Amino acid sequence: MTILSPRFCISVTLAALICIMTISVVSSVADSLPEPEGKALWTYISETSPYTQWGQFDEHNGMQPGNAPHGTMHALFVNNIGLASKGQAQYGTIMVKANYGADNLLKAFTVMYKSKGYGQDTGDWFWAKYSPEGEVQAEGQPKGCVGCHKSMKDNDWTMTHLW
Ligand code: HEC
């Protein structure tokens, strides 16, 4: 039987520890949800966890016709937390709506993000509107977004999907 030197054992243990620590730091950064803030949310949905890799509600998938003030057509992407939610959206739910004009060109992104403690008067939803390039055009609790979605307050402020 080979007897391992203590020095060898310590190096192996240290290497393993460093490896585990690196993995946990990397994965916690990747998993952690953004602050309810326009730019941070954009970075999250465009880079950290790209919305293009998310799923869609079964009853609202692909391109769908939309109502004013949203685009003529739209596609709605929902992260896993949202897709797994029942009864109401769980904290961490993000819905990204890509809005297209009659010319089929992307006009804007409108996003809803359920962030714990953000604001009880808006169901803890943070709202944001972006240009196709990600420039923040509105964020927070804009009166327009909140005022209109309020009609669906009993369905957690959501129009397209019954939770
Ligand atoms: C005048 C009403 C109205 C206003 C104002 C409005 N919305 Fe909507 N929103 C809707 C309707 C209706 C839908 C359903 C899809 C559609 O018809 O385009 C919707 C759908 C959505 C969705 C998909 C999730 C859901 O609720 O079904 C998001 C995200 C969204 N809106 C974000 C916003 C944001 C952000 C703003 C403000 C910048 C905003 N909306 C302003 C009416 C409105």
Image (cartoon, helix red, strand yellow):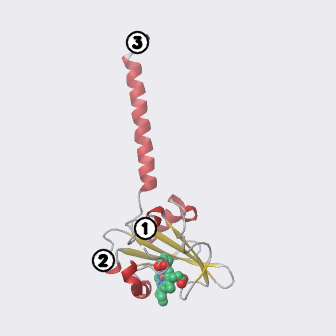
Q: Does the residue labelled 3 lie within 8 Å of ligand 1?
A: no
Nearest to N terminus: mark 1 or mark 3: 3
Place of residue 50 in the rendered image (x, y in percent of width and height, measured from the top left): 54, 62
Nearest to N terminus: mark 3 or mark 2: 3
Q: Quadrant of residue 146?
A: bottom left
**Residue for point 51% across, 72% down:** 96
- Which quadrant of the figure contains the C terminus? bottom left
Residue 137 at least partly seen = no
Q: In this view, does 70 lie above or below 48?
A: below
**Residue for point 47% across, 81% down:** 159
- Which quadrant of the figure contains the N terminus? top left
Helix, strand, or loop for circle 1?
loop
- Mark 3 highlights which residue? 3
Helix, strand, or loop for circle 2?
helix
How many marks can you see?
3
- Mark 2 highlights which residue? 120
Place of residue 143 in the rendered image (x, y in percent of width and height, measured from the top left): 40, 86
From the viewer's perspective, is the residue at label 1 or at label 3 nearer?
Answer: 1
**Residue for point 39% across, 28% down:** 13
- Mark 1 highlights which residue? 93
Q: Quadrant of residue 114?
A: bottom left
